[in-house]
Amino acid sequence: MGRLASTFGAAALVLGLVIVLAAWASSGAGDTQVPTSVPQDARPPQQVHPPRIAPGISFAGNPLPLERIGVRERMERELLIGTFRHSSSLLTLKRSGRWFPIIEPILVDSGIPADFKYLSVIESGLANAVSPSDARGFWQFMEPAAEEFGLRVDREVDERYDVEKATRAACAYLNEAHDRYGDWLLAAASYNMGMSGLSRRMEEQGGTHYWDLMLNDETARYVYRLYATKQVMEHPEAHGFVMEAEDWYAPLETRDTIVVDTIDDLPAFAARQGVSFNALKTLNPWLRSDRLSIGDDQYYVLKFPLR
């Protein structure tokens, strides 16, 4: 009786194994081919759309001549850079809330189109930058040009770092260039390559307008960058930059102190004013040492925190 039971049990086990194997084979579980279909939960790649040139865009009253050969492609190149260079574009947008209210009134008061505030953007990103050629400040003056337009540059003071004074110096240059060329785009181009260089190219090529000239790569891009920067900064959301009110840097709240005598120890002077040396230098970046020499016919305005 025991041997019979074990025989039936073995037969049942074999039969069950055969049934399982048959079901497994019919379900395709034994197929080792890798499926080629995309998983249902896979996400599509990020969609990237090229920015569009804003209809009727202009700079300093000059419409962008899209009908000219090459203009559309060159403009689109600068728009792509301004749109997708996210960190630098965002920083510049944030800084514009602080510095445009200072720069724009000086431009207008000097007879310069307000659009030229974007020239300081493409020069420095609205920061006191230093270039490989040692141009400095928001408006990137070289030392000889800075002194030519009335800025003090020495071991103690470098007024290229004074946004207000440097903006006035830039206005003096742009007015001089406009008087020479009678055209704001040529004045802008000369800011990059110099009036002598631009005049030489105009004479060589017989061109009278910026769009007529074949210039070096940097200057050839320069005016397009002005148009593109204006478009991106005037319509940031159209280029993917969503800014809340608190995202813009606010103008600094400061009080002014006029000084007419040489200060031999700026850290001690700051302490007497109730502020740190760091705060003094941050608000007055044109101070380049720990003293300030002032001539008999000079005075300086130092900014201090309002609170």
Image (cartoon, rainbow, N blue to C red):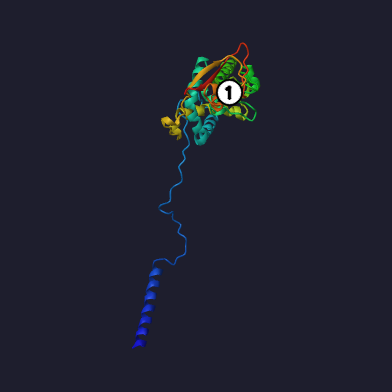
What percent of the width, then of the height, locates residue 77? 53, 33
Query: Which residue lies most toward the top here?
Result: 297
Foreground residue, 166 or 181?
Answer: 166
Query: Which residue lies most toward the bottom here?
Result: 1
**In the displayed structure image, the side of residue 203 where residue 78 appears, left or right:** left
**In the displayed structure image, the side of residue 304 where residue 42 appears, left or right:** left
Which amino acid type corresponds to the residue marked 1 in the rendered image? Answer: Ala
Q: Residues within 10 Å of mark 1 (few under 14, many from 20)?
A: some
What percent of the width, then of the height, locates residue 273? 53, 21
Asked whether the viewer can see residue 195, the reply is: no
Asked whether the viewer can see residue 269, the reply is: yes
Query: Which residue lies most toward the left here?
Result: 1
Vertical side of 25 occupied by 180: above or below = above
How many numbered marks appear? 1
Q: In the image, what residue occupies the spot 37% across and 74% down?
A: 19
Q: In the image, what residue occupies the spot 43% across and 51% down?
A: 42
What percent of the width, then of the height, locates residue 190? 60, 22
Residue receiving disc 1: 268
Q: In the image, what residue occupies the spot 59% across and 22% down?
A: 266
What percent of the width, then of the height, locates residue 228? 51, 29
Q: Quadrant of the N terminus?
A: bottom left
Foreground residue, 74 or 229?
Answer: 229
Vertical side of 150 occupied by 289: above or below = below
Disc 1, SS: helix
Rendered image quadrant of residue 15 = bottom left
**In the displayed structure image, the side of residue 152 where residue 13 appears, left or right:** left
